[in-house]
Amino acid sequence: MTTMRPISLPTEGQSLAGWVRSTWHAHPSAELISLFSRRQFESALRHGDLICVAPNAYVGACHATSLHSRVDAALLWAGPPVAIGGRAAMCLYGELEEPPESIDIVIPRQRHLKAAPRHIRTRRTDFEFAPVHIGGWPLVPLAMAICQAFGDLGPSGVGGVVRPLASGAVGVEELQRTLDAMPRVRSRRQLASVIAHFAAGSESYLEYVAATNAFAGLEFAQLLRQHSLSVHGRQYRVDLFDAATMTAIETDGAAFHSGADSWQRDLNRDADLASLGVLTLRFSYRDLVDHPERCRQRLRAVLRSRSRTVTQKPRSIAKRTFMDR
């Protein structure tokens, strides 16, 4: 196992047990023995200061559960040319918060590795890609990582896709091209559905939930997504809009609608839209996710009431006009 990576050298008199606490990187046994001694190496293993997290890849015990240490060890074991994929790659891109228990190593199909440890999963592929280097590590492109990880994410899978789409970290077209090109993708249909909803205008997880759950179905098919309205020289874009009743529906995530500034901005926005006769309904994350039926009932009632108001106004105007004549 030959590496060309830089390592931090121990200070004079520093023990191996003390040094491995100060670095999270993985090291082969020969490297540790050359820096210290075989006696210190065996002593650190015996006392639990040093742990083998992949074949001939050792880290300090306090770092053994770290994603970064486990990724470093997996790459040290596998050797080039490989790349980190799946959920581990998504975490390193900053698109997932919960690190996976296993690390996905992506290798060319013609390459063979010895039996991988239980916490390392090898993915052989013919799909050609240019690795992206983050922190010195080779990662598969984000779109590829999403396609690999989606089927493993379970209930959080949609959120794991929506987050990078909403932030612009990956584009809709790029993700669709990657999905089309990869021969094996678990839960392909569901992933394609998420991509299609973003292509149609969804821009956040809440908007996706609203479109596919809370406000799905024919009764809400007339709602326009991401509809733009101009008022007093200002442009506003509403998440969902019912033109017939002049009703705007906003999905309010706490990250973008909390704090005094956001609250004041929403008040100003709602007042401007009201000057056009637009009523704004706001639904919170908790309402949409935990109580979708309650949201549907509320929106039905408002649309029904607004519909009666809109249809009654022209009749009263026509009657007054006729009497004036």
Image (cartoon, rainbow, N blue to C red):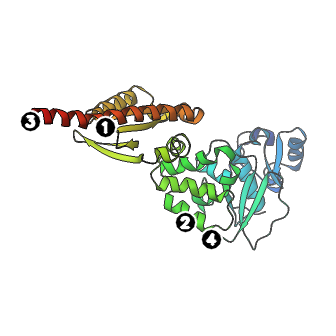
Question: Counting other residues with Cα less than 10 Å from the Cα at mark 4, is it few (<14), some (14-19), or many (20 or more)?
Answer: few
Q: Earlier in the sequence, mark 2 or mark 4?
A: 4
Counting from the top left corner in percent of width and height, residue 102 is at 76, 50
**Which dot, 1 or 3, sits closer to the camera?**
3
Q: Secondary structure at mark 4?
A: loop
Quarter the C terminus occupies: top left
Q: Earlier in the sequence, mark 3 or mark 2?
A: 2
Q: The disc labelled 1 sits on which kind of residue?
A: Thr
In this rendering, position of residue 76 left or right of residue 208: right
The Cα atoms of the two marked residues, 1 and 2, are separated by 46 Å
**Which dot, 1 or 4, sits closer to the camera?**
1
The Cα atoms of the two marked residues, 3 and 4, are separated by 77 Å
- Residue under label 4: 128
The Cα atoms of the two marked residues, 1 and 4, are separated by 59 Å
- Residue under label 3: 325
**Which dot, 1 or 2, sits closer to the camera?**
1
Q: The disc labelled 4 sits on which kind of residue?
A: Glu
**Which dot, 3 or 4, sits closer to the camera?**
3
Q: Is residue 21 above or below residue 140?
A: above
**Which dot, 3 or 2, sits closer to the camera?**
3
Residues tagged 1 and 2 counted as in contact (Cβ below 8 A) = no
Question: Counting other residues with Cα less than 10 Å from the Cα at mark 2, is it few (<14), some (14-19), or many (20 or more)?
Answer: few
What's the mark number on residue 311? 1
Q: The disc labelled 3 sits on which kind of residue?
A: Arg
Q: Is residue 36 above or below residue 5?
A: above
The Cα atoms of the two marked residues, 3 and 2, are separated by 65 Å
Q: Is residue 275 visible?
A: yes
Q: Earlier in the sequence, mark 1 or mark 4?
A: 4
Question: Counting other residues with Cα less than 10 Å from the Cα at mark 3, is it few (<14), some (14-19), or many (20 or more)?
Answer: few
Q: Secondary structure at mark 1?
A: helix
What's the mark number on residue 177? 2
